[in-house]
Image (tube, helix red, strand yellow):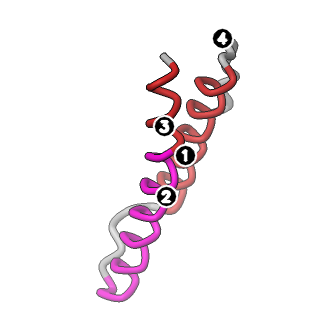
């Protein structure tokens, strides 16, 4: 499980950079098909999972409708 936490620490910033690139490209091409709220949801979910796994927490709060 420790290896999984290390991978998440590396993967989350890469995921964030790819989402930002996708948004910029969509705005540049005037064909932005990904809603901003989906991006925010994905980022917050990834950060929550990373923090939970790295700290070894077993309780997760779900705050989505």
Disc 4 designates what residue? 58
In the rendered image, the vertical position of residue 6 relative to residue 25, given as above or below: above
The image quarter in which residue 24 lies: bottom left
- Residue 2 % position (x, y): 52, 21
Residue 8's disc is 3
Separation of disc 3 and disc 4 at Cα? 16 Å
Task: Inspect the magenta stretch and tell me whether residue 21 lies in it.
Answer: yes
Separation of disc 2 and disc 3 at Cα? 12 Å
Q: Secondary structure at mark 3?
A: helix
Q: Is residue 25 left or right of residue 60?
A: left
Mark 1 burial class by Cα count in 10 Å: few <14, some 14-19, many 20+: few
In the foreground, 19 or 55: 55
Q: Earlier in the sequence, mark 3 or mark 1?
A: 3
Q: Main secondary structure of the magenta part?
A: helix
Q: Earlier in the sequence, mark 2 or mark 3?
A: 3
Residue at 48% of width from left, 52% of height from top? 38
């Amino acid at each position: 499980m420790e290896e999984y936490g290390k991978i998440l620490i590396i993967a989350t910033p890469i995921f964030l950079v790819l989402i930002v690139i996708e948004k910029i490209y969509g705005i540049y091409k005037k064909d932005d098909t990904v809603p901003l709220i989906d991006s925010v949801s994905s980022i917050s979910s990834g950060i929550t999972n990373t923090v939970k796994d790295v700290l070894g927490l077993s309780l997760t709060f779900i705050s989505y409708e």
